[in-house]
């Protein structure tokens, strides 16, 4: 049993392979957090301390007992209104206008299998893989109830947290803050690792001390955003890649979020992650239920590498779904950087001919094939094929490309609309705008109100009408602006609109995948603006960044690797000079970097030399040989490309039988020193033979001293070494 309830101590203990999570119902009915960390036995209530502390109030139930205060005690669901002045997980505005709720324990259930959340993405697991703990809490005055949900996947060292809020009272209430997970540590010095960025430069690693006061990462943009990723790590100060304790919190949601880390007056640390509380005030009528999106938790006592691997395996095998969950993805050529908006059916077919000749497996037709769409100022929302531009029906183009032995994919941006479109002219009220105000434009487009069912249904039917025209096996789902002017004309309570928008989006995606179960969906939002665990439930791969420059991609993919598996990282070889930076890097280097992802190409093969074409054939062959190891192997970061001369990473098969080592030289200097690449995760006492050189190495020496990288003239050389156990 991974979930144990002690009737005497009133403790709930959640065990995974390497961790223990424990909480306790105390004598007043509060649900206190006792422990989360290295697996252990026994009751950890001894960690709680009590003292009369100035300006820390006491619950009415405690009578004259001044030593008992929620302002100090660690809790599972801290709420506003109990005398805890730290940041709460839940804020409720009651029907009489008062704020506050005081949740006390009512009961529990232990269920086999992992819980699901209606309308929302969530980790899944059957009865042999997972258990669920449900704990019921209630505010007796208002009748508001909360059921806390804990999913335990013991073999993966994963615990998930969610909850549902039920208005059990007689009047309307407003939920004004809803965080899915709260972790309270009574001691310890922690660093917060967060992942910040901007469009075309996402998920840069930042590690700072969790200091007194509150540190906040968030998105007010209606999407998880390029600016902050909805994932954070709390690591003890001494923790490294290979040793030390660390905790991950990853939000399974694609809209606005808020993560908080607060060190209080008594050197205790609280971490919260959940929905953004800005522009959020969700109404609940009597009897209505609100579902809080899920947070995935993991703990490692063996450093950051193991923590990342826990998340990788969980997301790859228990969040991603469908035909392509465990399959090697097709090597594709995307038309965007080859053609932009300047193409017709014949030019796309010629691209496909080149792709087939080079050994690629799919041609993707990007933006510009629909409506009046020769630039990004018009046409969004008009989802009908521009046959005049293509010079043929879409069905004919698909047939011709399939005839080359290639799969066919296509680009959509279903959530947006241009004012210069038939859709907007016919239904201007379907776009987010505030009455009487000029809308905030971005990329000359507005956002459709996906909180309204009729809007979602209309776009869904139009999109299906396109997908039914031929054998379309891949869709790139793009979203190229942040939400603003979030006003829905059919909603009296505007504080619900952004959450309902996400429910509309998820409903659309779910229906799409049910109707087209063999479709490979790739998420995209200007690249990595919606790279989150929520989207992985629908799209097993996400375009990692609009920036395909190999050097920039090293740092982007490095940051991404802390929370997301390589199989989810959309990565392509693009042309040089690079279209985002103007930088020139060797073709071999671009390929090695793109092989830390789903692998594809974003260029015009007709502009390549015969030597480059032959190199691409060899790259594709090499990728296919190692694709299973890349997609399913244990991933190790061998360097920090933000601070070291090399960017290096490694894939190790779970049984340790083979390794793929990758490195890119970031700097070159006169009289250059040698960089030794120390490998990780190998079984001790083994020998490995390198495929390329035939050299044989001892596993212990590889991990202790490493392999010397060649010292070569020229910039940005890359190296890839495949080793097999002898």
Image (cartoon, rainbow, N blue to C red):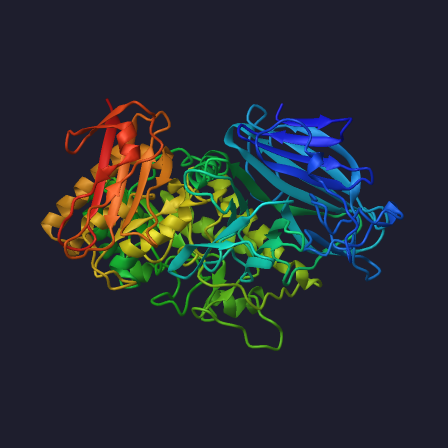
Q: How many marks are shown on the rendered structure? A: 0
The location of residue 98, given as percent across then percent down, is: 82, 60
Q: Is residue 269 placed above or below 317 in the rendered structure?
A: below
Q: Residue at x 76, y 29 (%)?
A: 9
Q: Is residue 238 left or right of residue 201?
A: right
Residue 357 visible? The answer is no
Q: Quadrant of the N terminus?
A: top right
Say which quarter of the image contains residue 343.
bottom left
Residue 55 visible? The answer is yes
Front residue of 371 and 238 = 238
Q: What residue occupies the far left of the structure in this picture?
A: 610
The location of residue 217, given as percent across then percent down, is: 54, 57
Q: What residue occupies the far right of the structure in this picture?
A: 63
Q: Is residue 87 left or right of residue 297?
A: right
Front residue of 478 and 674 = 674
Q: Is residue 501 placed above or below 137 in the rendered structure?
A: below
Q: Is residue 436 placed above or below 244 in the rendered structure?
A: below
Q: Is residue 310 placed above or below 190 in the rendered structure?
A: above
Q: Quadrant of the C terminus?
A: top left
Say which quarter of the image contains residue 620.
top left
Q: Residue at x 21, y 61 (%)?
A: 577
The location of residue 374, given as percent across then percent down, is: 33, 67
Q: Residue at x 32, y 33 (%)?
A: 629
Front residue of 4 and 329 = 4
Q: Residue at x 71, y 27 (%)?
A: 5
């Amino acid at each position: 049993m991974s979930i144990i309830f002690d009737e005497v101590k009133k403790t709930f203990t959640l065990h995974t392979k390497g961790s223990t999570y424990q909480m306790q119902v105390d004598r007043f009915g509060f649900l206190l957090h006792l422990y989360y960390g290295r697996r252990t036995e026994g009751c950890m209530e001894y960690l709680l301390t009590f003292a009369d502390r100035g300006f820390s109030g006491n619950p009415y139930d405690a009578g004259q007992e001044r030593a008992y205060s929620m302002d100090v005690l660690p809790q599972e669901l801290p709420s506003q209104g109990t005398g805890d002045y730290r940041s709460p997980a839940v804020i409720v505005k009651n029907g009489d206008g008062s704020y506050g709720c005081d949740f006390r324990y009512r009961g529990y259930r232990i269920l086999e299998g992992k819980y699901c959340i209606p309308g929302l993405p969530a980790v899944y697991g059957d009865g042999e893989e997972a258990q669920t703990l449900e704990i019921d809490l209630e505010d007796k005055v208002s009748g508001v109830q909360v059921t806390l949900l804990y999913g335990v996947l013991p073999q993966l060292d994963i615990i998930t947290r969610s909850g549902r809020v039920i208005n059990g009272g007689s009047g309307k209430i407003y939920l004004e803050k809803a965080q899915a997970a709260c972790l309270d540590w009574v001691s310890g010095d922690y660093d917060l690792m967060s992942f910040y960025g901007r469009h075309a430069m996402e998920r840069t690693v930042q590690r700072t001390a969790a200091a007194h006061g509150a540190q906040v990462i968030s998105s007010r943009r209606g999407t998880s955003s390029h600016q902050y990723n909805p994932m954070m790590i709390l690591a003890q100060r001494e923790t490294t890649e290979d040793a030390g304790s660390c905790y991950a919190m990853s939000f399974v949601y694609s809209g606005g979020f808020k993560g908080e880390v607060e060190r209080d007056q008594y050197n205790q640390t609280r971490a919260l992650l959940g929905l953004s509380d800005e522009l959020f005030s969700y109404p609940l009528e009597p009897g209505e239920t609100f579902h809080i999106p899920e947070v995935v938790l993991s703990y490692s006592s063996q450093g950051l590498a193991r923590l990342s691997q826990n998340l990788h395996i969980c997301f790859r095998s228990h969040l991603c779904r469908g035909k392509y969950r465990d399959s090697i993805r097709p090597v594709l050529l995307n038309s965007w950087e080859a053609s932009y908006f300047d193409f017709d059916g014949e030019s796309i077919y010629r691209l496909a001919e080149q792709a087939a000749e080079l050994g690629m497996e799919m041609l993707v037709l990007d933006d510009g094939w629909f409506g009046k769409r020769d630039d990004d100022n018009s046409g969004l929302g008009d989802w009908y094929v521009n046959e005049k531009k293509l010079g043929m029906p879409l069905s004919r183009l698909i047939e011709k490309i399939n005839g080359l032995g290639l799969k066919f994919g296509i680009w959509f941006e279903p959530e947006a609309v241009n004012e210069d479109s038939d859709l907007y002219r016919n239904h201007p009220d379907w776009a987010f705008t505030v009455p009487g105000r000029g809308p905030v434009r971005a990329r000359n487009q507005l956002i459709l109100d996906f909180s309204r069912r009729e809007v979602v249904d209309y776009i869904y039917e139009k999109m299906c009408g396109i997908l039914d025209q031929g054998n379309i096996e891949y869709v790139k789902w793009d979203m190229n602006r942040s939400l603003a002017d979030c006003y829905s004309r059919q909603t009296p309570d505007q504080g619900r609109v952004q959450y309902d928008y996400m429910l509309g989006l998820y409903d659309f995606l779910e229906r799409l995948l049910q109707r087209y179960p063999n479709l490979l969906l790739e998420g995209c939002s200007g690249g990595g603006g919606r790279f989150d665990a929520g989207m992985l439930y629908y799209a097993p791969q996400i375009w990692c960044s609009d920036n395909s420059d190999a050097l920039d991609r090293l740092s982007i993919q490095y940051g991404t690797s802390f929370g997301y598996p390589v199989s989810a990282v959309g990565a392509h070889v693009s042309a040089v000079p690079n279209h985002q930076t103007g930088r020139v890097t060797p073709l071999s280097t671009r390929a090695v970097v793109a092989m830390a992802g789903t692998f594809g190409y974003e260029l015009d093969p007709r502009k390549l030399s015969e030597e480059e074409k032959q190199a691409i054939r060899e790259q594709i062959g090499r990728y296919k040989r190692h694709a299973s190891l890349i997609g399913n192997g244990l991933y190790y970061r061998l360097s920090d490309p933000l601070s070291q001369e090399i960017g290096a990473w490694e894939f190790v098969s779970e049984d340790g039988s083979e390794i793929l080592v990758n490195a890119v030289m970031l700097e070159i200097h006169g009289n250059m020193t040698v960089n030794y690449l120390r490998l990780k995760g190998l079984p001790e006492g083994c020998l490995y033979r390198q495929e390329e050189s035939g050299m044989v190495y001892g596993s212990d020496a590889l991990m202790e001293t490493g392999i010397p990288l060649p010292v070569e003239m020229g910039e940005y050389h890359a190296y890839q070494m495949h080793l097999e156990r002898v």
